[in-house]
Amino acid sequence: MRHGNSPEVTHLDADGRPAMVDVSGKQATARSATAQCRVRFPAAVARQLRDGGMKSAKGGIVDTAIVAGTMAVKRTWELIPFCHPLPIDGVRFAIDWRGERELEIDCTVRTVHRTGVEMEALTGATVAALTVYDMCKALSHAIVLGPARLVAKRGGKREVGKSP
């Protein structure tokens, strides 16, 4: 469904019904994507987490977030209806403080396939952020997640941002 020069919505068939994109005619190429999600803590909670080495009563917060995010990347196709199951060649997380109160979570995903891994990177970053929230919610329910966004994408027709 294309209107003038506007981009095409890809998950609709000719009749406007939901449909998975057919990628069988595309060339398999190296693809990567990096997504980011932030977690903002109340000042006292951020201080407590920093002083406690990013540990909670449930364990190591960053390590648990990385494991949860990686598991989510591998299961994205089960969560998002029109995502293709993809061979995931690599997942990397970078988690670090930005300022006194914000934790920045970057998730980079790589594959060689006919379709990109933007949704996998976004899923990994957001599930990692949700895991941080879950592990810290006993300290405060005023923790804020987001924004979540795609920061880079390589391979395929369109590239976004800096190389992951």
Image (tube, helix red, strand yellow):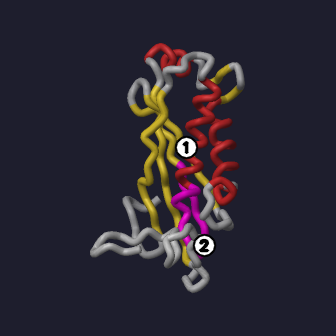
* 112 on left or right of 118: right
Q: Amino acid at mark 2?
A: Val
Residue 48 is covered by the magenta coloring: no
The answer to whether 102 is drawn above or below residue 87 in the figure is above
Q: CA distance from mark 2 to mark 1?
A: 23 Å
Give x and y (percent) for residue 26: 55, 83
Tell whether 157 sits left or right of 128.
Answer: left
Region in magenta:
107-120
SS for callout 2: strand
Q: Quadrant of the N terminus?
A: bottom left
> Which numbered marker is on residue 126?
1
When the figure is inspected, residue 23 is found, relative to residue 36, above or below; the finding is: below
Q: Which residue carries the number 2 mark?
A: 112
Check residue 109 for magenta coloring.
Answer: yes
- Give the crowd class for mark 1: few <14, some 14-19, many >=20 residues within 10 Å: many
- The amino acid marked with disc number 1 is Thr
Q: Position of residue 79 (x, y in %)?
A: 65, 53
